[in-house]
Amino acid sequence: MKFFNFYKKYLTVMLLVLTLTFGACNRYLDIIPDNIPTLDHAFAMRSEAEKYLYTCYSYMPKDGGMASDPAMLAGDEIWTNDLSGSYRFSHIMFNIANGRQTTINPAGEAIWVDLYKGLRDCNIFLENIKRVKDMTEEERKEWIAEVKFLKAYYHFYLVRMYGPIPLVKENLPVDINVADVQISRAPVDSCFQYITQLLDEVKDDLQPTITDPIRMMGRITKPIVYALKAKVLLTAASPLFNGNKDQAALRNRDGLQLFNQVYDAQKWKLAADACKEAIDQCHDAGIKLYEFIPGGVTTNISEQLKLQLKLRNAFNERWNSEIIWANTQSIASNIQLWATPHLTTYLDNPNVTYELAVPLKIVDMFYTKNGVPINEDKTWQTNVTTRVGGIEDQRLIRLNYETAESNFDREPRFYASLGFDGGVWYGHGYYNDEVPSGIYFVEGKLGQKNGKKGSFGSITGYFVKKFVHYQSTQANNGGYSTVNYPWPLIRLPHLYLMYAEALNENAGPTEEVHQYINIVRKRAGLPTIRDAWDNFATNTKYSSQAGMREIIRRETLIETAFEGVRFWDMKRWKTAPDELSRPIEGWNVFGQTTEAYYKKQLIYAQKFSMKDYFFPIRDANLLSNKNLVQNLGW
C-alpha cells in the first residue's frame, strides 16, 4: 500500500502535510519514486478502491498502546517502573506523567503526523471514489460515509490533544501558490462545528449493524456515528472548551482568538439531545448491556463469580452486546502480559511481566460495597490497616490471608477491575469455583510469586485485572496463550453516563438523570443513588446539581476505569490541576512481611500546570509554518 502515499498529481497536498508534520517540505521533491501507479489505477475497480478504503482506516490511533495512547501512561490511572521494560514498550507517553514533555521532540508527535496523513488520504478517497464503475451507488454512499466519519474522528482526536487545529477540509489544488500552504489554526468552535457537520452528513447513510461479520467487523455503523457525535458535543460543552478564559491569550498571528470566552449553556442541551439520539439508535440496533451466561468451562459457578465475569468481560469479551465501537487497529494482546501477575508457581515466565500498576488514589476511587465513596460511607472502618480473609469473602480474598483492610467490603467493580495481594484472580485455565483451593490468588510481597522482581512487578501493589481475559492462560514452561480483543472505544454504559452528565448540566438532577445512572449501578450490583446515599452516606449531595455532578463524574471514572477515558475527562472537566497533582502512592512492595508491606510509600510527586492541558506543537513545525502558533506555556 506504500505507493498510495505518493502521487505526483498531489504534490502540493504533500507540501501541506509535510508543513504540518515534518517541517521540511522541500524534501518531498527528492523521494518521489519512478513508475508509481496512478490514481487512475487505484480507483479503476472496486477491489482496488476497497484497499484504499482500508488505508483510510489504517490511520486509526493505536488505543490501549503504552507507547501510542496518551490515556494509558500520560495521566495518573496506570503507573509503571520508570526505567523498566525498555525492551517491552517505549515509555514516551510516561514522560508526560513524569513531567518530561518537550517541544523539540514531543510525545504525541507521531499522532499529529499520522492523523494529518490520514486526513490527506481520506480526502483523496472522497475525491476519486466516483471513478469506480463496478460498485452499486448504495455501497459507494456507505464507503463515502465511512471515510467522512474517519475524517471527523481524526480531527476530533487532534482537537482533544492540541485544542484548535488546522482543518483539512479538502486537498489543495495543484496550481495553488506554495505560500498559501502556510495555514493557521481554526478557532476551537469552528473545529467542533466542522466535525459535527461531517457526522451529520453521514449519520443516516450507514447500516445499523454489520451484515458480514467475518469481513467487516470494525467498520463504521450508524450507532457509532451517533455515539461519536454525542461524545464530540459533550466535549464541546465541557469547561475546557466552553468559555475557557484561561486560554484567552491563544491567538493566531493575525490576532484571531482561538477559544471562545463566553460560556454557552445551550451546548449542554445539544449534547443531551445527541446522547439520547445515540442511545435510541443503539437500542434499535440491538445493543444492550452485556450479561455473562455460564457455559462450557463455567457451568457451575456462584452468583458472585457470575457478577464478576459480567463486569470484567463487559470490557474484554470481544464484540459483546454493549460494545458500540471497538478499534480493530488496536488488539489487546501484549497489554495482557504486562498486566497479568504470575498465577502459577513459575517465577521467571519471561512473557508475563505484571508491571502495569494502579496508584492507591485510583484504588480508593472505587465505592464501598454500599455504593458510596469511602470518605462518605458512615460504616467504613478507618482505623484498621489489615484484616484476615474470612469464609464470607473467600471468592474475593484468599481464605485466612492477611491483606489491606481497604481491600474488603468494596463494590463488585473493584474486584472485577483490580488484582492485589491476597485477591482472588479467577480463570487462566482453571475454572473450578471451589474455595479456597480451587481458585488462583495473588501473593504480592517481596519474595512471593507476584512480588517485585527487578523491572517486573507492580510498583504499587495493585494490578489491572480488567485488561486480562479470564480465559487467557500462562504455563509453567513460560508460555502464554492470550484471548485477544479489539480495544473498545465506546460502550453503552458510558453513553448512558454521558447522557446523565449532559442532562444534569443542562437542567440539574432530574429523575431521568437518576434513571440512567441507576441502570449502570444496577448492572454493577449497587443500590440506586437515593438508596445508597440515604442509608449509608454522610450527605445527600445527589439533591443538588453540583453534588450530582460529583456523583456522575465518579461513576463515569469507575465504570470506564483503565479504558482510556479518565485522562481526557480530567482535562475537559478542568479538574486535572487537582487530580493530576495528587501524589502517586503505593504499598511498600519491597516489604517481605505484612507489617512492612502495608505502609504507604510516595512513588512520585506528580504536578499539572495549565500548559499541560494541551500537547505542544513540535518546534520544527512552527519554524516551517510561520502561521502556526504554539500552545500556551510551551
Image (tube, helix red, strand yellow):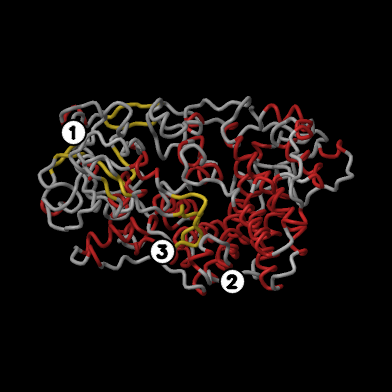
Horizontally, residue 179 falls left or right of residue 288, namely right
Give the answer, above or below, for where 123 lies relative to 342.
below
Distance of label 2 from label 3 (alpha carbons): 18 Å
SS category of the residue bearing label 2: loop
Q: Give the labeled residue for mark 3.
A: 320
Residue positioned most to the front: 35
Q: Relative to 208, does residue 339 appear above or below in the rendering?
A: above
Whichever of labels 2 and 1 marks the residue nearer the N terminus, that label is: 2
The residue where tag 2 is placed is 207
**Place of residue 603 in the rendered image (x, y in percent of width and height, measured from the top left):** 36, 27
**Tag 2: Cα neighbours inside 10 Å, few (<14), some, or many (≥20)?**
some
Q: Name the residue under label 1.
A: 448
Give the label on residue 155, or none.
none
Three-letter amino acid code at the position of disc 2: Gln
Image position, residue 234 (x, y; %) = 58, 55
Give 368 or 150, whichever is nearer the viewer.
Answer: 150
Q: Can the viewer see residue 17?
A: yes
| Residue at 29%, 55% in the rendered image | 471
Q: In which quarter of the image is residue 136?
A: bottom right
Q: Disc 1 or 3, which lies upstream in sequence?
A: 3
Mark 1, other Cα within 10 Å: few <14 / some 14–19 / many ≥20: some
Evaluate if marks 2 and 3 touch, with contact meaning CB atoms under 8 Å apart: no
98 sits to left or right of 429: right
Secondary-structure class at tag 3: loop
